[in-house]
Amino acid sequence: MSTRKILISCEHADHIIPSMYASFFNEANGDLTSHKGFDPGSFDLAKYTARNLDVPLYYQKVSRLLIEMNRSLNTPDLFSKYSTVLAEKDKRLLEQKYYHPYRNEIEGKISEWVEEGHSVLHLSFHTFTPSLNGLERLVDIGILCDENIESELKFSEQWKEQLSIIFPSLLVMINMPYNGADDGFTTYLRTKFPQTSYLGIELEVNQKYIQQPIWSDIKKGLVQSLA
């Protein structure tokens, strides 16, 4: 009998820079520890949810400023202003050492489950800065999907409804503050698996709540809404 399998990923879990690349980031301290270097709180959310749902968790702790796990190859955002100065051979080495192993492991697990006849729900956990370019973002929790895929939109609407019931004071929106059909890991994976077998959903939580008492409630509420 086929079942729905769930896996969780966290592409921006930390802001680690391996020592061999440290010299390129001497002036990047502020960026590394900000939303530019990683997604603060995302790993905490992902770990808690994966543990309580008893599902696999995949994460990358190397900073997105070294190489961006949530972008396709040959896109301008793959390397930041700090790492784009690396020689081409060093960029290929970064891809071979960090990018491909991380993404291939997740794609391999999904492929394994699909071949066994299961459908897969892939939840990619992220957080976002409360303001960007001087504009405040009003959304509190974002659920990102491809709205042209009926199964993803239906799941997102149902999840939004559950979260809105659990958190009546929070604004939960679909495809805010980003569009789930834009370039990203889930967008790539949609091209590899049939819509009947793979749902790629990104979760975005506002970072302004990380140091607030409600953060613990958000973690518990995410598990409750998915359970």
Image (cartoon, helix red, strand yellow):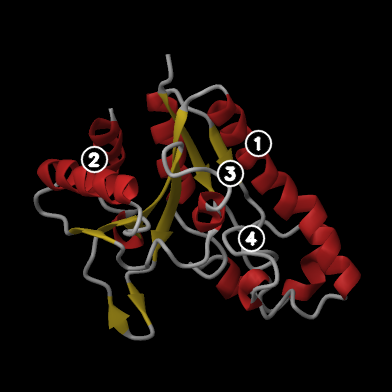
What whole-number distance in Å separates the C-alpha atoms at marks 4 and 1? 23 Å
Horizontal and vertical percent position of residue 199:
42, 43
Q: Earlier in the sequence, mark 2 or mark 4?
A: 4
Q: Nearer the viewer, mark 2 or mark 1?
A: 1
Q: Residues within 10 Å of mark 4 (few under 14, many from 20)?
A: many
Q: Which residue is mark 3?
A: 59
Q: Residue placed at 54% from the left, 61% from the top? A: 38
Q: Residues within 10 Å of mark 3 (few under 14, many from 20)?
A: many
Q: Nearer the viewer, mark 4 or mark 3?
A: 3
What whole-number distance in Å separates the C-alpha atoms at marks 4 and 3? 11 Å
Mark 2–mark 1 contact, CB under 8 Å? Answer: no
Q: Which residue is mark 4?
A: 63
Q: Is residue 8 left or right of residue 145?
A: right
Of the 4 image quadrants, the one containing the C terminus is: top left
Q: Is residue 111 left or right of residue 19?
A: left
Q: Earlier in the sequence, mark 2 or mark 1?
A: 1
Q: Secondary structure at mark 1?
A: helix
Kind of residue sitting beneath label 2? Asp
Residue extending farthest top: 1
Quarter occupied by residue 65: bottom right
Kind of residue sitting beneath label 4? Ser
Q: Residues within 10 Å of mark 1 (few under 14, many from 20)?
A: few
Kind of residue sitting beneath label 3? Tyr
Q: Which residue is mark 1?
A: 108
Kind of residue sitting beneath label 1? Gly
Q: Which residue is mark 2?
A: 217
Mark 2–mark 4 contact, CB under 8 Å? Answer: no
Q: Nearer the viewer, mark 1 or mark 3?
A: 1
